[in-house]
Image: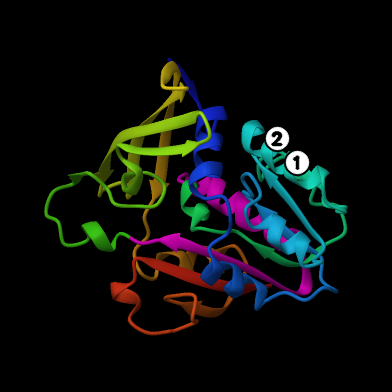
């Protein structure tokens, strides 16, 4: 079994399981956009949000660190009349000297995949540098709500979109079936949820091979990201607890959404 980071089977699984962007989050992101804007989606994955933006005529670029996710995104765009630039890179390698953007967004709380504080700061600085003076950054993070009142520093079986809701789950498309199994632990001292996931590929009912992913997520205290973004020279325009842009009860929110500016 080979280990990958959002490798081929993981990318295949998510394309089958989540072929389109969820309408609530898509509409939330569209509320910040206009067709005159330059838009960038870091951590764009296989393009489930980029595609509907392109379909609606929005100029949008993207980048991701997974070559398999990027390959799927580019394949989808080939059949469309799109000038989108889709790069294989991380925040550190992104060409932030290109023309700045009006809107930069990160979907599905993927910002929580950045667990190291230096990398988090680097990502925020890159987005700030790539943003127009009037631009906005829209992102969200997963909170530690599920574990906050647990007395143990190690908690098993996380329930997050990235992994645990899919434990022992099968997805199928035609003759292809992918089976996901995994388990997670949470280190409350480090605020890191660590998951080991295995993807088993079957074709016509016959086992082909397995891919193993190690995924880590940083879970945030309710106001923790506020201090981090401000230390990076960004300002919080708004915070929300859901896609309806409610702004109450952050202490009991499992996800917090941010609208940032320079």
Q: Residue at x 27, y 63 (%)?
A: 145
Mark 2 surroundings within 10 Å by alpha-carbon count, few (fewer than 14), some (14 through 19), many (20 or more) = some
The percent coordinates of residue 243 (x first, y second) are 49, 75
The percent coordinates of residue 261 (x first, y second) are 66, 74
Mark 1 surroundings within 10 Å by alpha-carbon count, few (fewer than 14), some (14 through 19), many (20 or more) = some
Real-space Cα distance between discs 2 and 1? 5 Å
Left or right of residue 35, residue 212 in this image: left
**Residue with the mark numbered 1:** 74
Q: Secondary structure at mark 1?
A: helix
180 vs 101: above or below: above
154 vs 174: above or below: below
| Quadrant location of the C terminus in the rendered image | bottom right
Quadrant location of residue 60? bottom right
**Residue with the mark numbered 2:** 71
Please tell me whether residue 140 belongs to the stretch shown in magenta: yes
Q: Secondary structure at mark 2?
A: helix
Please tell me whether residue 100 belongs to the stretch shown in magenta: no
| Quadrant location of the N terminus in the rendered image | top left
Quadrant location of residue 36? bottom right
Report the magenta residues as a range: 114-143
Furthest-left residue in this view: 151
Left or right of residue 192, residue 18 in this image: right
Query: Which label number is shown at residue 89?
Result: none
The percent coordinates of residue 132 (x first, y second) are 79, 69
Q: Are marks 2 and 1 in contact (CB under 8 Å)?
A: yes
Left or right of residue 119, residue 186 in this image: left
Counting the numbered discs, the total is 2
């Amino acid at each position: 079994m080979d280990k990958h980071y959002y490798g081929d089977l993981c990318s295949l699984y998510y394309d089958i399981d989540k072929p389109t962007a969820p309408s609530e989050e898509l509409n939330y992101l569209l509320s910040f956009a206009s067709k005159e804007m330059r838009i960038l989606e870091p951590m764009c994955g296989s393009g489930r949000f980029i595609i509907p933006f392109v379909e609606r005529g929005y100029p949008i670029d993207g980048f991701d660190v997974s070559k398999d996710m990027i390959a799927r995104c580019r394949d989808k765009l080939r059949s469309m009349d799109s000038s989108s630039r889709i790069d294989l890179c991380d925040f550190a390698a992104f060409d932030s000297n290109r023309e700045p953007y009006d809107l930069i967004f990160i979907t599905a709380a993927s910002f929580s995949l950045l667990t190291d504080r230096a990398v988090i700061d680097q990502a925020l600085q890159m987005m700030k540098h790539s943003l127009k003076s009037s631009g906005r950054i829209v992102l969200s993070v997963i909170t530690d709500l599920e574990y906050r009142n647990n007395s143990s520093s190690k908690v098993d079986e996380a329930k997050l979109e990235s992994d645990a809701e899919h434990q022992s789950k099968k997805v199928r498309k035609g003759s292809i079936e992918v089976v996901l199994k995994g388990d997670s632990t949470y280190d409350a001292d480090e605020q890191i949820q660590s998951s080991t996931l295995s993807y088993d590929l079957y074709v016509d009912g016959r086992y082909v091979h397995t891919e193993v992913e190690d995924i880590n997520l940083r879970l945030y205290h309710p106001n923790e990201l506020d201090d981090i973004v401000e230390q990076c020279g960004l300002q919080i325009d708004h915070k929300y607890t859901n896609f309806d842009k409610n702004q109450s009860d952050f202490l009991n929110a499992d996800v917090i959404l941010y609208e940032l500016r320079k």
